[in-house]
Image (cartoon, grey):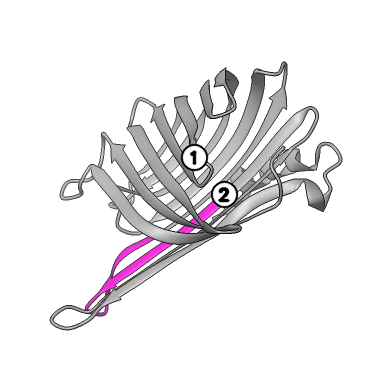
Amino acid sequence: VERMRLVIGFVFSTFMIGSVQAADWSGSVDVGADATSGNTETVSFTASTALAVDLENWRHSFAATAINKTDDGDTTAEAYLVGLKSDLKLTQRDYLYALADGEYDRFGGVRERGVLGLGYGRKLIDADDFLLEGEIGGGYRYSRAQDDVIAREGVGRASLAAVATLSDSATFSQKFLVEGGDKNVRSESQSELRLTVIGNIAAKLFANVKHNTNVPTGTKKLDSHTGVSLSYAFGQKK
C-alpha cells in the first residue's frame, strides 16, 4: 500500500506544474453494466474516467477503471487501475514524459503492479482525422503474483497509440504497450470504438487484452475484457 502511495504521489506532483484552470480540463465518464438471470445469474459492472489538460508547455492526463463481475453470487472478476502521466513538450511533435501506473487484479496473472516511468515520445502522424504517437522509455516496476511472489525490477517500455476520426459521430482508438524486465514481459492491447448517440453522450465498445510471460502455475497468461458502456464527455480538447 505504501509503495502504491509513492507511485501515485510521484506523478501527481507534476500535475501542479504550470497554471491549470478548471475550464482547461476535458474528459469522460463511462459506465457499463449487464445482468442475466435464469439458469445462471450473472452481473457485471464497469466504470472508468479519463481527464486531460493541454497547456502551452505541458500536457497532463489521468485515468481510472473499476471492473467487477459475479456469477451465481461468486465474484469472478475484480480489478482496479489508475494511471497518471505528464508530458513536457519539447517541440510541436516531441515531448518527454513521466508516468505512474497502479493496478490490482484479484484474479489476473499479476495481482498487484506499480510502475514509475520516464521516457521520450513523438507524434509520428498528426493529421486532422488521424493521430499516431510513439513512446519509448524505462522505469521501475513492483509486482506481486497470485502466489504472493514479489518482483522488483527495472523495465523498458514502448508503446504506440492511434486515434482515427471515422466520421462526425465515430472515433476509433488503438493502443499497444510492451513493458519488459528480466522477470516478466507484459504486453497490452486496448481497442475502443466510440459512437455518438446524442450531444455529449456516446456508446463505447471496447476490448482490452493483457499478456504476462511469467505467471504462477495454474494461472493463465492471457487476460481479456470486452464490453459496451455509455460515455459522457465534457470539456473541450485543445
Structural crowding at the residue carrying mark 1, measured as other residues with C-alpha within 10 Å and reported as few (<14), some (14–19) or many (≥20): few
Marks 1 and 2, how far apart at CA: 25 Å
Q: Is residue 190 left or right of residue 56?
A: left
Residue at position x 82%, y 44% from top? 20
Mark 2, residue position: 63
Residue at position x 69%, y 41% from top? 237
* Viewer-proximal residue among 30 and 1: 30
Residue at position x 33%, y 30% from top? 183
Of mark 1 and mark 2, the one earlier in the sequence is 2
Mark 1, residue position: 167
Residue at position x 17%, y 78% from top? 40
Structural crowding at the residue carrying mark 2, measured as other residues with C-alpha within 10 Å and reported as few (<14), some (14–19) or many (≥20): some
Can residue 119 be found in the magenta stretch?
A: no
Q: Which residues are magenta?
A: 64-78
Residue 7 is labelled as none
Q: Quadrant of residue 78?
A: bottom left
What amino acid is at disc 1?
Ser
Q: Quadrant of residue 125?
A: top right
